[in-house]
Image (cartoon, coloured by chain):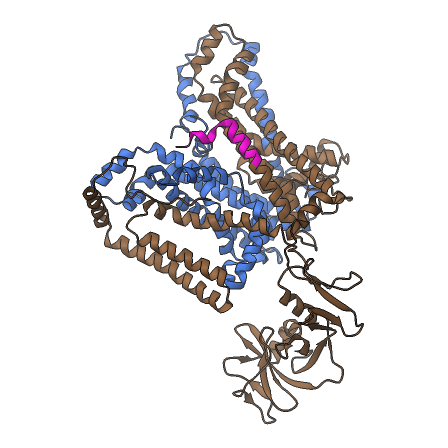
Amino acid sequence: MTTPVPRQTSDAEPVRQSKRLRQAARMAEAASVGVKTLLLKILLLGIVDAISVYALFVLFLKQDWVVFGLVLFVTAVVNWIYFSRQKLPAKYLTPGLIFLLIFQIFVVGYSGYIAFTNYGTGHNSTKEDAVNALIVGSQQRVPDSATYDLTVLDQLGAYSFLVTDPDGDISVGNAETPLHRVNDAETDAAGTGIGLPGYTTLNFNDIVNNQEAIAALSVPLSDDPNDGTLRTPDGSSAYLYLSDLVYDASADTMTNATTDVVYTADPRSGAFTAENGEELRPGWKVEVGFDNFVTAFGTEAIRGPLISVTLWTFAFAFLAVATTFALGMALALVFNNMRMRGRNVYRVIMILPYAFPAFLSALVWAGMLNPQFGFVNQVLFGGAEIPWLTNEWLAKFSILFVNLWLGFPYMFLVTTGALQSIPDELQEAATVDGAKPWQVFRLIKLPLLLVSVAPLLIASFAFNFNNFNLIYFLTNGGPRDATAGVNVGATDILISMVYKVAFVGANRDYGLASAFSIIIFILVAVISIISFRQTKALEELN
Amino acid sequence: MQSAAPANRDDVTSARFIPTKRPFSFSRWFRDTGWRHLVGIVMIVFSAFPLLYVLSASLHPGGTLITANGLFSQIDLGSFITLFNLPQQPYAAWYGNTVMIGAITSAGTVFLGALAAYSFSRMRFYGRRAGLLMLVLVQMFPQLLAVVAIFLLLNGISDIFPLIGLDSQIGLIMVYLGGALGVNTYLMYGFFNTVPASIDEAAKLDGAGHARIFFTIILRLVAPILAVVALLSFVATTNEFVIASIVLISPEKQTLAVGLYQFVSQEFSSNYSVFAAGAVLAALPVMALFLFLQKYIVGGLTAGAVK
């Protein structure tokens, strides 16, 4: 994306000015800025800079140099733009552009990256985290190990262990920081640590109230995860827990001490894998190349649903626009009669579905179409059990029907506006020439109407292409396709499939979901190019 | 306001028809306008029925889907009271969150969009055409396509700034503001262009700077389009489910769309009247605003399309 680079200071002035004139204009501009405005500007920039400095500080501590550099760069650019005398367009565009670049354009690129990773449940984090999680996860208390006297400390809501080992040495640590010796601890008569400056000691009640969090805490004994961790079952004494799994950093293997099975780190799949193919979970995130796309297109159980979902997405978006436009236009024609009384009453009531929040409409219709209890079956069809939302084809019909209800008012409003902007003279002239009403409509009104509403129809198509709420709230994408390798149903469109693969159910697969997103991006891009070519909408930009 | 004009025009034109005194004939009346009333009545039933259904369901305390079928068999506000006392579903908090997130997002959208529209409309600079092109293209790619990346980005931000990361409403608003340029800026750009540049020039001769011209003159002249964009953005934010559902995790931080969906999916048929009460309350302000500003919205929707 190109960021507009400002070139000219003043407003639209194609007239060439001499250098002195320009200088004078600039001075006048600068002089017109009041003190208050200047102070406000400095205050706002100060707030922005303060936030960035805080961010830079945190990033420095985390040693996250890439983001550090980015934040520094953006802050510098922002300051440069607003303190510069020139760069006027940039001053107006920068605030919106920053949000746009991060949350609209960067995320698209990031989706592209995730599509080439195995990011998802079981592959969420770095390898280091995976090693720690594996070791902590397979810990067991060492039989007959020493007992450490324990005091639970609280610092800003995070718990730490203050332990006194059998030799009388006192150390402190928490989940992130391994145990380290402290010398300034308060002790009781027996030499057991009971408090530490800067921390609050938890009393018995606090411990009982936060039992689960404290029982879940495991404090590493040292930097080496193989040394084991301390845990407490009761909040007053801690025991050494050792893992079954032993990590060998030099060989990059994980060995199960009980069964002696060796799991080797596999950089391709991002997991420790035994010779028999057994994988330890969790693994870590790795780049997997085109694996996700190969899965999407190569696996029969996913390719089939993907193709049918794509076809349905197109069919739905097209039919949604066609049906709502047809009804909306028909109504606009019917009610575009000056002699008809009470048109405004009809009009206001017909707009109601459009004014009603769409997500609620879908939920209300889901209730009315409920097969056993819903109004449609119980009252309109006299107690029949018609599976409106659970039969594949009826569900598709229901979705289009509800969408018709939701969408026709918009088309009605838009075509009414367009119809009224067609000069009456055209119709009168045609009538005088002997045209029948149908001919007037087909040969005069419709073409003129289409010219003006075509961009809106394209926008409506694009909206329905991703009409997540209707599908998800009405049928949840169902009825589910049992043969599919992913959680997908007969009425799912592409975007609801992405959502379900990434966020619904126990097995989240961000990588595969992003691969699907990329497919949608490509489809939408192709549609946009074709439709903009057709309507030449972009050529009118000036 | 060229596009709002057609809505008013029919009153003017209808005055032009001079009623001719003819004996009343039903068949002629029916052929001319009567059948239109029939269509109108059918459409009124179709449009309004679901809304009456949900209203009647909300007035039937303890009602289920089955009892909702007896329309207006009982009228009682009990469900509305139940609604605010649900232990697991903090409806009042959802309501407040939705209004707050919607209001901040729409204010931000209007502000950022107006700034950009002003510069596109009044200044000539390198990359301007590309920028305008981008505004049009961005509309084709809604943010929810990148929902996975947004989730993981916020997840990453949480490690550094929990305040704007996952489960933070500020984070969600920032994500929404990412869509501020694009969706409605083009609409504003078109409207800004209808304000004559001579006004700017006159102010400039009088010594006003660019900021003063923008804030005190232009923004007031384009107020109608700002209202339309604010309302459209508010409605869009209220209806947004995908991103809100993955960002907001704790129940007391969620919005109505997320909360009510989860409420319904947990106990749909059994507690229908409470859901209906929630739906009615959620819809009322939006519908009121919509009908109140109807004329402007229609103008806004068709702006750019109807010339």
User: The chain drawn blue is chain what?
Assistant: B
Farthest residue to the front: give it. Answer: A251
Residue B97's spot in the image, x, y percent?
Answer: 51, 53
For the point 44% across and 15% down, which residue is it? A424
Based on the picture, tell me whether residue B289 belongs to the magenta stretch: no
Based on the picture, tell me whether residue A532 belongs to the magenta stretch: yes
Span highlighted in magenta in the image: A526-542
Image quadrant assignment for residue A38: bottom left
Q: In the rendered image, is residue A396 in sight? A: yes
What is the chief secondary structure element of the magenta stretch?
Answer: helix
B258 or A453: nearer the viewer: A453
Count up the numbered dots: 0
User: The chain drawn brown is chain what?
Assistant: A
Q: Quadrant of the C terminus of chain A?
A: top left
Identify whether A218 is placed above or below A356.
Answer: below
For the point 33% across and 34% down, which residue is it? B195
Identify whether B103 is placed above or below B299.
Answer: below
Residue B17's spot in the image, x, y percent?
Answer: 42, 13
Residue A345's spot in the image, x, y percent?
Answer: 50, 27
